[in-house]
Amino acid sequence: MRRHVLITGSASLLASQLAAQCLASSEDTVLLRLRRPDGSLHDEEELHLLVRHAVPRLPGPDTAPPWEALRSRLHCLPEEEGDGEAPFARALPASGRIDEAWYVCGGYRPAPGARADTGGTPRHLLSALSRLGVLELNHVGPWLAPGEATDFAAHHRAQEREVVAACAAAGVGSRLFRTSPVLGPVPALRGPDREGGLQLLEALHDLQAELGERTPDYLAARPLRCWAPAGASVALVHVGQAARRLWELARAAGTVSRGFHVTASERLPFTRLCEQLGAVYGMNLQATAERASLNAVDRGLQERLGGFQDGLTASGGEDPAFEEVRLDGAARPGLLQEVRASQDAARAGQRARAATLFDTLGQRTVERGGSRLTYFAGGTGDVPLVLLNALGQGLFYWKRLMSCLLRRHRVLVWEPRGTESGPQPFLMGDQVDDLEAILRNEGVGSCHLVGWCTGPKVAVEFYLRHPDRVASMVFLNGSFRCSTSPKTHQTAYEANFEPLCGLLVRRPAMAGSVLKSLRLSMSQEEGELKGLQDAEAASRALARMNGDLKPHVLGPFRSEPVIVNYARQIVDFWSYDLREKAARVHAPVLLVSAEHDAVASPETSREMAQRLPNARHVHVQGATHYCMYDRPEFIAELIEEFLRNPTPTRALAAVS
């Protein structure tokens, strides 16, 4: 008998593998609706990619059916926001009933400042069980070790109790499943879709790639330590095997109203797992039970692990209410290499798309002030993201982040004028006028403003002119310094650059000698890490600039006329004091600062967050002024979560 099976939740890797298993082993129709951990919905193209990737990797002796033979029975539910029953009701089959529903949630801890239930509460489904005609509901969640994960475990266990109670009240059969950390190759789609064992492998891959661009010699010469309780072990399961066993248990008679823990046949000591991962990723990865031994780089890995360590245990931890179901084989080392290869391919594809991004965008012009202003536009959406670049800088810095944001947003960006193009002098008010002209040319009524470095001041000035046209603002490494700022709230760069700018405004003829001095100081090689103590080497490694950016930071210093015009802009910029204006800004604001920002003082972001009535502040440990380039996926996650849930969080969130 053909049935209609709904699969929803936030664990996209396991859920898509489960959808593939259902399509390949039955004649059932699958209705699929998945959220990312940040709460945003996967679109239809992404859902098809996830399931198509899973089909040829189904376990078992039989050859998987071709994707084309299965895709007609996969229906992706509408990309509607909101957690009501409408998206499910509109997808009801002709029978008017969903025979079986699966809710698959991951074990990924939300980022600091994000809601704990983002993308992970099934209440919208539970409230609609009767009206949807659901006969059985299967809830799949992570197995969590006791001790370290009490708060997170309580959240998931409360979900389980809620599922059982709602199903009993609606007369719906229920099953509860817990899975040990799953592991499997990732599709070309990159994003915050980490779950299970992938949390550790994604953290390693991301940190290695970032350090490779910023400090290529660090991991080649020094160990990377990962904390775990003494004697810790982990039961990694192949995601395909886990999905198949879940499917078989749900089909078996007598399994309703029972709980099952799907796990590996044996647990792997965490020290051994680190050795295997070190060999796969080409690094010296060491397990340690001493938190005090972690340096800044090690702590950066620790903070990226999400909920992975909630699946580690030193002993015991089994729940007698859940029957243990052991899979035939553990996730073998060859699978680690397969995951690594899929990660490399996914990252290479994303970086290649970012590298050619501006070749794919629409280039448009608008006349203002007797000259032509060129800007770029791409993506779709009703309320665009408008990117406000730093004075004197090109658009190279934005490529990676913009590539992430374009997946779900319409985006506008341009180079600030005034160093080479546009009438002179071209000051703060002119930058706001340019913003107005572009929005008018695009017919934009409301927008989200995303400003980097000097961009936040332009955003606030525009907001004060048109408060009804700004839905929200994001300030990335904002430079809020003004001429009356406390000396304690400025970087060495700001302190040294201020007198040089004043000199150039008064005596433009000095541009040649100033340029020579600046180029010399900025071209000096950073010192080697060899011979430094462990803690000092880690701190210096994280403070280094990405090598890709070194040619671009010299943009304002490429010629004498450019640096003179830039100096005029900076002196004018520093005359704008936002401290007293902040109280008039009622739009939601996300401020992101960085521990090693040598350009814009993080203290001014902290202060501005306290002055703004509706602000959230995230301070990123181990990051620099250019963290939107170094960690674009992470910054995109912060922005996406903020746009979905702009309610301010007064407590400072510090993340690595």
Image (cartoon, rainbow, N blue to C red):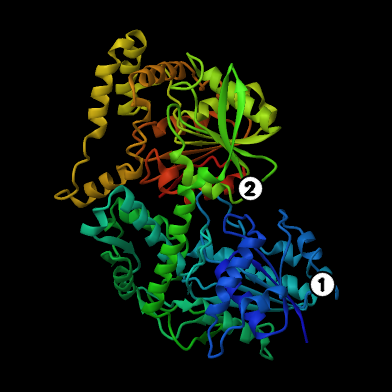
Mark positioned earlier in the residue sequence (1 or 2): 1
Please, is residue 127 above or below residue 389 in the view? below
Residue tagged by mark 1? 93
Question: Which element type, helix, strand or loop, lies under badge 1?
Answer: loop
> How many numbered badges does the structure rendering display?
2
Can residue 471 be seen in this snapshot? Answer: yes
Judge left or right: residue 514 versus residue 637: left
Percent x, y for residue 641? 58, 49
Residue shown at the point (53%, 50%) measured from the top left:
637
Amino acid under disc 1: Pro
Residue shown at the point (74%, 70%) measured from the top left:
166
* Front residue (pair 72, 314): 72
Rendered image quadrant of residue 397: top left
Rendered image quadrant of residue 41: bottom right
Residue shown at the point (32%, 22%) measured from the top left:
497
Q: Residues within 10 Å of mark 2 (few under 14, many from 20)?
A: some
Judge left or right: residue 602 versus residue 377: left
Question: Which element type, helix, strand or loop, lies under badge 2?
Answer: helix
Residue 644 - label: 2
Nearest to viewer (mark 1 / mark 2): 1
Percent x, y for residue 499? 31, 16
From the image, which quarter does the N terminus lie in? bottom right
* Front residue (pair 110, 554): 554
Judge left or right: residue 192 versus residue 483: right
Percent x, y for residue 417? 49, 24
* Front residue (pair 214, 118): 214
